[in-house]
């Protein structure tokens, strides 16, 4: 059969790691089967698959809401049908690296809210901590179950030109996107029947079960069936679909702040029968909105007095309150030092070099080389408030510099990293686009578990380096392969 | 040894029944060698359980909820406190030594929190005034007194022009406010020259002349003076806060010390009425003789040194924990 | 069941039922507007569903297509189909994990159909009845899907209570509008098209013909709409169903709340059953209808207070 022409003319970007093609445009071995499968399809077939994917997302209401001039517009998170593949060796490395990193981050949070050894030993400068808006003095000396602060982490990884994985960002507060990991897989099953088992792709659908098991184990009341709820800001939140998906898959109640009430340091939900005590809250509401009594008084998304119940240990809250001090972008640069400090180990996963702009020398260097830098706000995520030096105009740069000088603590800069590319099916052709990877790690009393997979985000705009959904990003199904069997054949599942 | 009888009543009246209210009170006088609490009665509408904890700043904080519908909430706190005069700083150490001692505190807990400046519009203007007011050969103690007087002289005491939420920007523009604003202004000035300063909430007890701030909760500032500790300065009355000031809480600013706050559910507005009355039970003249040893908080100015450089303090802590567990097992 | 979830079920249903009522009303009235050479007016429809805004009625100038457009796709109109379906969908969204995926998709489709920008064009150019039928079909699909796929739990009970409460209120509203007009225009009492129209807009004309052989009479129409157990839009049928689904909530209620609401439902049932309808006319009839409507609202308020935690 004639090879479909959508393969031809793939223009790999020089000095960038491509997931599918080696430098000589030879297909990397994990992708061979996929390519063989695709070779049998025509452009029309693939177009049909793409349409099917879109229709499935829309029909199932897998959408996020963008608010524009007061009216909510529902959009699907664009999905690229070509999967991203991670070999079992690569995954082992990533998994070890994330486990190590999270272990250290959890120890850091425990330490920072209790003895602060790491500060006393001058590993992390005290002013970086005390000037962080997410360092919550309200959490000082508050004990949390099993000393776990980060129960759910989304660690953003990128690959440099050598294919080495680097950590771009830690998300330790309310990482989102896991529902896309689950839904993307379901869609792929429909698009490419039989391909998944023949390639030996590990499953991801255990995630809700693992999460539920961890949540349940945190219950302060030793009862057989503790009440676990998922606290959502409500239907207007852009991730609401994810909240309902997770609640449904775990079989827990999806609640909003107004459903909960605190009485004598215990949390209850309002039911048609009366008040029912709540033991564990998986919250998708940010710290500052969680308790209007203690944090933002104008918040209507939270529960007044919940901090008191938490402090007393009458309710478990996931993730812990105050985690923002560990995923602040200024503190990010100290994570390798934390790993050495707490674990006495060398970090497995490297950081992207980071300049803290509160340091005048670093600032001067960054200003001089701003064309090669990405400048980020330390307390923002989702691709908001970034300056991409190579693409910004003189004016934008000047304005941004003024902003930096007003509060340099709030900014960091990183050299523009050449994110790896993966082939995407765009307008009937395979085209390289930049990607990252967010695996989801779950920390429970029995250890850290990472479902083999994650969310591969892709910058669908040609030439773009920003993968965030708010900035025109999309996603791909992410395959982690089983180890090859000794004969070199793929294990059948 | 004046003994004060303080009655502090906070009354919220709602325009209709409200429910699910959660409240936080910081109404428990600090207990130390200068202040003892002889009696404290707290009564609250509906007799809810008040749970208390010690916050980051060492204050005792109470919290309670009221879930049933109610149309008013009265928190009545009756305290009998005994205060003792604290001798003033001796201030006989060379100024530069004292300033150096303060510099060493800059990156230590808790002082780092009491030195941090938040950016505000009038900062440059204030910096100029602060520089002009600060005379080089003076000690931190002298500078603190000077600043206290500056606020007293240059800001007008007017009730009602500011609220609990008024930011320092506005106070600076208005050049007026109440004790809370005066205290915020003074802490800001002290922090600018590197003197750790905290906000204090409490009660002022009348003396013969009568003072501003009676009949309500009062607020002032504390400056950290080397070889002495926290010195209370009341910029509203331009005096040192001593045995006539009863301290309830300390913090970075008002919101760390807010005596009563709460959240409720219901479509109705509320009215707040606060009354504080202080009875001066003591007829005796103020004590001339200081019966108490002046315990000065000595800040550790030397960096933490480790005898075993191979292990960091976290690792030593782990070992200690292990030892404790072993001891427990042996019992 | 969470109070908010119960409330969302209840309101979801009330909105869907209301949209059904409006659509049917529009369809019948449009058909009548084609029959009647004179005397047809949209005022009663605007009276029921736009709170009797006569200034508005003036603006629409009895232009059937303008009225339909206003009642279906005007976002400013809180009672337009688009507004109502949007609210129904928002309620469904907030209980998405409690309703069947099929039902959610069905409502989602209803929403997207109403939102379709072509709808406005079609109302202008095509036969409005066919376009209304497309929407009515969406509601029927919804009811069918709910019947087949919804878990038989408290959620469905709250849905049905909302549905029948809304239906009873609508039927009473239609009666009130029609019988009130008589006092202004006594000739209407013997106008058979007038009563036929009432029955058609409630979907009760065929049942009427089977039940009453002696032509269209106001008394019989009243009796059917209030008391006919076989007529699915009668007030007694609706109230019986409210009771039926409320009884299933016993295990999801606190004892006192259950007893209180039960009492008021029973009281309303008795009032409907044991009032001699034939003796009621004029002011007495008006008082009776108003009383029933008040009691229906009272049940709604009690649910709000005792079940939906909105006291």
Image: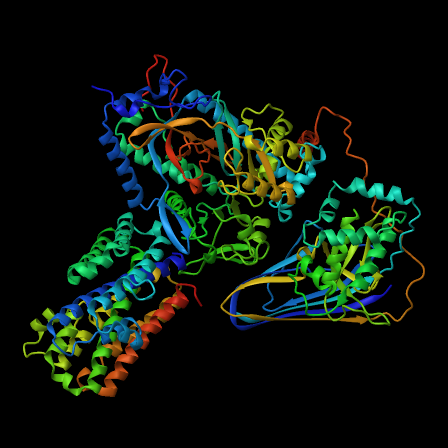
Q: Which picture quadrant has residue B263?
A: bottom right
Q: Residue at x 27, y 42 (%)?
A: A55
Question: Residue lying furthest front in this view?
Answer: A394
Q: Is residue A155 left or right of residue C18?
A: right
Above or below, comparing residue C17 to residue A359 in the picture: below
Q: Which picture quadrant has residue A369?
A: top right
Q: Nearer the viewer, residue C197 or A388?
A: A388
Q: Position of residue C219 (x, y in %)?
A: 15, 81
Above or below, comparing residue B57 to residue A366 in the picture: below
Q: Is residue A396 left or right of residue C163?
A: right
Q: Position of residue B32 (x, y in %)?
A: 80, 54
Which color scheme does this rendered protein use? rainbow
Q: Position of residue C310 (x, y in %)?
A: 43, 65
Question: Residue lying furthest top in this view?
Answer: A487
Q: Is residue C248 visible?
A: no
Position of the C terminus of chain B by quadrant? top right
Q: Is residue B245 left or right of residue B88?
A: left
Q: Residue at x 81, y 35 (%)?
A: B302
Q: Position of residue A169 (x, y in %)?
A: 53, 34
Q: Nearer the viewer, residue A288 or A55?
A: A55
Above or below, comparing residue C281 to residue A344 in the picture: below
Q: Is residue A185 visible?
A: yes
Q: Nearer the viewer, residue C106 or C66?
A: C66
Question: Residue lying furthest left in this view?
Answer: C213
Q: Nearer the viewer, residue C309 or A243?
A: A243
Position of the N terminus of chain B by quadrant? bottom right
């Amino acid at each position: 059969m004639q090879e479909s022409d959508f393969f031809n003319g793939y223009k790999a970007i020089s000095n960038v790691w491509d997931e599918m093609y080696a430098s000589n445009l030879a297909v990397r071995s994990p992708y061979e089967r996929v390519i063989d499968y695709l070779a049998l399809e025509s452009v029309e077939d693939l177009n049909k698959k793409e349409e099917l994917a879109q229709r499935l997302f829309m029909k199932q209401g897998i959408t996020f809401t963008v608010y524009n001039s007061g009216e909510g517009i529902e959009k699907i998170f664009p999905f690229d049908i070509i999967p991203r593949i991670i070999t079992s060796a690569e995954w082992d490395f990533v998994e070890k690296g994330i486990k190590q990193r999270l272990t250290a981050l959890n120890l850091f949070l425990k330490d920072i809210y209790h003895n602060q050894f790491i500060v006393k030993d001058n590993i992390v400068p005290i002013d970086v901590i005390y000037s962080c808006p997410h360092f919550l003095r309200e959490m000082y000396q508050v004990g949390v179950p099993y000393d776990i602060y980060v129960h759910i982490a989304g660690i953003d990884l990128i690959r440099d030109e050598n294919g080495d994985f680097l950590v771009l960002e830690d998300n330790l507060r309310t990482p989102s996107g896991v529902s896309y990991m689950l839904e993307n897989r379901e869609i792929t099953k429909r698009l490419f029947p039989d391909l998944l088992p023949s390639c030996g792709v590990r499953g991801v659908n255990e995630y809700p079960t693992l999460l539920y098991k961890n949540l349940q184990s945190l219950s302060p009341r030793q009862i057989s069936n503790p009440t676990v709820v998922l606290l959502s800001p409500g239907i207007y939140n852009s991730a609401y679909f994810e909240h309902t998906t997770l609640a449904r898959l775990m079989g827990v109640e999806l609640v909003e702040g107004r459903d909960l009430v605190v009485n004598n340091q215990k949390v209850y939900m309002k039911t048609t029968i009366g008040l029912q005590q709540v033991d564990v809250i998986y919250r998708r509401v940010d710290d500052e909105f969680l308790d209007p009594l203690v944090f933002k008084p104008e918040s209507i998304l939270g529960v007044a007095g919940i901090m008191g119940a938490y402090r007393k240990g009458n309710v478990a809250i996931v993730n812990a309150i105050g985690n923002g001090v560990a995923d602040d972008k200024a503190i990010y640069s100290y994570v390798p030092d934390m790993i050495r400090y707490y674990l006495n180990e060398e970090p497995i996963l490297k950081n992207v070099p980071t300049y803290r702009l509160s340091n005048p020398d670093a600032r001067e260097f960054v200003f001089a080389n701003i064309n090669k830098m990405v400048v980020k706000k330390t307390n923002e995520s989702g691709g908001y408030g970034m300056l991409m030096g190579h693409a910004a105009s003189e004016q934008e740069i000047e304005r941004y510099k003024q902003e930096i000088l007003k509060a340099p603590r709030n900014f960091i800069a990183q050299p523009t990293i050449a994110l790896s590319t993966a082939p995407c099916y765009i307008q009937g052709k395979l085209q390289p686009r930049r990607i990252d990877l967010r695996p989801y790690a779950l920390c429970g009393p029995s250890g850290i578990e990472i479902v083999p997979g994650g969310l591969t985000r892709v910058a669908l705009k040609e030439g773009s380096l920003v993968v965030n959904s708010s900035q025109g990003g999309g996603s791909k199904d992410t395959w982690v392969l089983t180890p090859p069997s000794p004969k070199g054949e793929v294990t059948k599942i | 040894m004046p003994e004060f009888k303080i009655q502090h009543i906070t009354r919220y009246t709602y325009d209709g029944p409200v429910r699910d209210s959660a409240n936080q009170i910081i109404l428990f006088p600090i207990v130390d060698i200068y202040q003892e609490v002889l009696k404290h009665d707290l009564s609250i509408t509906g007799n809810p359980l008040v749970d208390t904890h010690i916050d980051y700043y060492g204050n005792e904080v109470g919290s309670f909820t009221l879930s049933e519908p109610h149309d008013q909430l009265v928190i009545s706190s009756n305290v009998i406190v005994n205060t003792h005069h604290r001798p003033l700083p001796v201030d006989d150490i060379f100024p530069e030594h004292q300033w150096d001692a303060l510099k060493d505190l800059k990156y230590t807990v808790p002082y780092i929190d009491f030195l941090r400046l938040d950016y505000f519009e009038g900062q440059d203007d204030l910096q100029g005034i602060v520089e002009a007011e600060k005379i080089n050969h003076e000690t931190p103690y002298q500078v603190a007194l000077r600043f206290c007087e500056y606020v007293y002289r240059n800001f007008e005491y007017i009730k009602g022009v500011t609220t609990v939420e008024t930011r320092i920007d506005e106070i600076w523009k208005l050049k007026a406010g109440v004790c809370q604003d005066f205290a915020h202004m003074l802490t800001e000035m002290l922090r600018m020259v590197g003197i750790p300063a905290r906000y204090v909430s409490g009660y002022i007890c009348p003396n013969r002349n009568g003072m501003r701030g009676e009949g309500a909760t009062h607020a002032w500032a504390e400056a950290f003076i080397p070889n002495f500790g926290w010195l209370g300065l009341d910029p509203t009355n331009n005096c040192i806060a001593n045995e006539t000031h009863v301290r309830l809480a300390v913090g970075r600013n008002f919101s760390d010390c807010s005596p009563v706050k709460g959240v409720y559910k219901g479509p109705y507005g509320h009215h707040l009425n606060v009354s504080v009355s202080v009875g001066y039970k003591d007829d005796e003249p103020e004590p001339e003789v200081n019966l108490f040893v002046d315990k000065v908080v000595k800040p550790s100015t030397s960096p933490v040194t480790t005898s075993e450089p191979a292990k960091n303090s976290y690792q030593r802590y782990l070992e200690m924990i292990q030892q404790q567990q072993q001891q427990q097992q042996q019992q | 069941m969470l109070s908010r979830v119960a409330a969302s079920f209840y309101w979801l249903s009330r909105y869907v039922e209301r949209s059904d009522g409006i659509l049917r009303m529009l369809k019948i009235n449009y058909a009548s507007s084609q029959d009647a050479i004179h005397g047809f007016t949209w005022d009663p429809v605007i009276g029921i569903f736009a709170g009797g805004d006569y200034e508005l009625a003036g603006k629409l100038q009895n232009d059937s297509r303008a009225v339909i457009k206003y009642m279906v796709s005007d976002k400013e109109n809180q009672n337009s189909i688009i507004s109502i379906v949007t609210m129904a969908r928002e309620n469904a969204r907030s209980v998405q994990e409690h309703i069947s995926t099929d039902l959610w998709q069905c409502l989602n489709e209803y929403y997207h159909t109403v939102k379709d920008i072509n709808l406005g064009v079609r109302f202008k150019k095509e036969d409005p009845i066919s376009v209304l039928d497309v929407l009515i079909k969406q509601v029927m699909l919804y009811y069918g899907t709910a019947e087949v796929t919804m878990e038989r739990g408290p959620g469905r009970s709250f849905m049905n209570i909302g549905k029948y409460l809304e239906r009873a209120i609508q039927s009473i509203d239609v009666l009130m509008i029609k019988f009130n007009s008589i006092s202004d225009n006594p000739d209407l009492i013997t106008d058979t098209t007038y009563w036929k129209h009432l029955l058609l807009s409630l979907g009760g004309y065929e049942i009427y013909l089977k039940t009453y052989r002696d032509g269209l009479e106001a008394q019989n129409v009243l009796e059917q709409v209030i008391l006919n157990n076989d007529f699915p839009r009668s007030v007694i049928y609706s109230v019986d169903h409210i009771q039926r689904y409320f009884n299933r909530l016993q295990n999801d209620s606190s004892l006192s709340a259950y007893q209180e609401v039960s009492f008021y439902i029973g009281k309303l049932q008795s009032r409907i059953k044991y009032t001699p309808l034939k003796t009621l006319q004029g002011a007495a009839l008006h008082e009776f209808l108003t009383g029933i409507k008040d009691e229906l609202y009272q049940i709604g308020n009690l649910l709000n207070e005792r079940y939906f935690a909105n006291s």
